[in-house]
Image: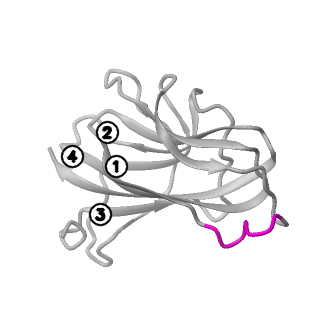
Amino acid sequence: EATVQGKVFHAVTPDAGVAPGTDSAGTTAAVALYNPVGSGKNLVVLKARLAYVSGTLGAGEMLWVANTNIAAAATTGTAMATTNGYLGQGRAAVGAALVTATLPAAPTLVRVAFVLDASLASTAGILGQTPEDDVDGAIIVSPGTTISLSADAAAGATPIVSISITWAEEDR
């Protein structure tokens, strides 16, 4: 129903991917979904997907982390390609999906999204795996707040992943 109404959006990192990070409590996140102050919308997180691109992943976890101080500076970063789930509908997203995001303050840990194994391209089974976190609305990003995905993992050797986020935008 929400997709038919043009309220569902998908964002994905650029083809080159993004480094997952090593410190989920830091102020740089692999990806972030920022809801601008005064947007009049709640961003209801539906899913996230993770895919291996290259390098050697460091063992650890990728976490959802939140910035909830609406008086803080806006989250910044490079815009991710965002598509309305109702293709051709034309409505643009209010939420700003960002790659290599700079957060206004150290975030609050929310929940684990993915487990990262120490892996590289030759690791049996790594190619073809696309872990999915079915959030199903358990995280709602209100205006002025940000939800991000950031790893708490070993550094690995130039690890690169692709991340996509799906969310719905609902009136407040």
| Mark 2 secondary-structure assignment | loop
Disc 3 to disc 4, C-alpha distance: 12 Å
Q: Quick one: 144 or 116, which is closer to the camera?
A: 116
Q: Which amino acid does label 2 sit on?
A: Pro
Q: Earlier in the sequence, mark 2 or mark 4?
A: 2
The magenta segment is 123-129
Residue 16 horizontal/vertical position (percent):
68, 61
Q: Distance between the residues labelled 1 and 4?
A: 9 Å
Residue type at numbered disc 1: Gly
The residue carrying mark 3 is: 8
Residue under the point 62% across and 48% down:
115
Q: Name the residue under label 1.
A: 95
- Do tag 1 and tag 4 residues touch (Cβ < 8 Å)? yes
Give how far apart the Cα atoms at labels 2 and 1 are. Answer: 7 Å
Residue 36 — which label? 2
In the rendered structure, does residue 126 fall within the stretch colored magenta?
yes
> Mark 1 or mark 4: which comes first in sequence?
4
Q: How far apart are marks 2 and 3 (CA)?
A: 17 Å
Badge 4 marks a residue whose secondary structure is strand
Lower sequence index among marks 2 and 3: 3
**Where is mark 4, residue-wise?**
41
Element class at badge 3 = strand
Q: Residue at x 34, y 34 (%)?
A: 145
Identify which residue, 98 or 29, lies in the foreground: 29
Task: Tell me the CA gap for discs 3 and 1.
Answer: 11 Å
